[in-house]
Amino acid sequence: MSIDPKIQNVYCVGRNFVEHAKELNNEVPKKPLFFQKSNACVNSEKIIKIPLHKDIDYEVEIVLLIGRAGKPNSDKEARKFIRGYSVGLDLTDRKLQTKLKSEGLPWFSSKSFEGSAVVNDEFIKQCPEEFFLKINNVDKQIGSTNDMIFSFEKIVLSLSEIISFKEGDIIFTGTPQGVGTLKNGDRIEMGFSKKNSFKYTVKYSEY
């Protein structure tokens, strides 16, 4: 059964897979590392627009839909805050992100640009263990919830220590290894399985 929500805030978890942290030469975190995209970044269309003069990286992730407002008090209660699951792309201007990090500045402009939170807004109620990303019919990323450093419950509980949830908030939960750069005309397929996957096309945009 799918859920078609009104998306509110967009939260993201960085470095939630050991091998992904290593491929970008980052330290493996001891607690969830959070950042945020603006609501204006959400793209639930079948066309993925990327800036013409920038190199934009893809990062496939499981996306949680928060189904109630407030703060959970335990892992068990945190699980009840999760209303559904989908798969999305956290798009990243990697060159800009690297530059900002080297200067000790926030990542915001490298993560929060128009269309940078690609998500299929038909959320399902049970989360499969594995998810994937294909580009032009070639496997690029394959992830498993078993390889996450921080569980969904830990993510929700930790984030609630910082903010109170609104119904309709979504959380990108981290990407496995294999990130790379999108190109004009790329054909994207991502999802939990062949029966539960979604297809997109990448197009350059002048914005």
Image: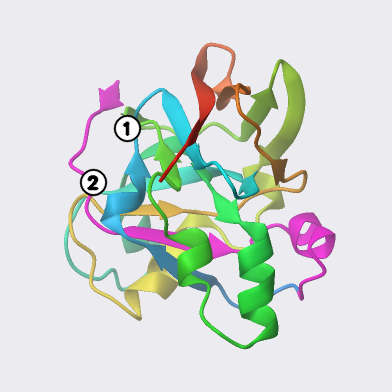
- Secondary structure under the numbered disc 2 in the rendered image: loop
Q: Mark on residue 77?
A: none
Q: Quadrant of residue 36?
A: bottom left
Q: What quarter of the picture does the N terminus occupy?
A: top left
- Say if 86 sits above or below 46 in the image: below
Q: Position of residue 93 (x, y in %)?
A: 59, 57
Q: Does the magenta run of residues contain 14?
A: yes
Mark 1 or mark 2, earlier in chain: 2
- Say if 77 sits above or below 132 in the image: below
Q: Does the magenta run of residues contain 177?
A: no
Q: Are marks 1 and 2 in contact (CB under 8 Å)?
A: yes
Residue at image mark 2: 7
Left or right of 77 in this view: 53: right
**Disc 2 packing (10 Å; few <14; some 14–19; many ≥20):** some
Left or right of 58 in this view: 202: left
Residue at image mark 1: 121
Left or right of 25 in this view: 115: left
Q: The residue under label 2 is which amino acid type?
A: Ile
Calculate the distance from the C-alpha at mark 1 to the C-alpha at mark 2. Answer: 8 Å
The residue drawn where x is 65% and y is 30% is 132
The residue drawn where x is 50% and y is 60% is 111
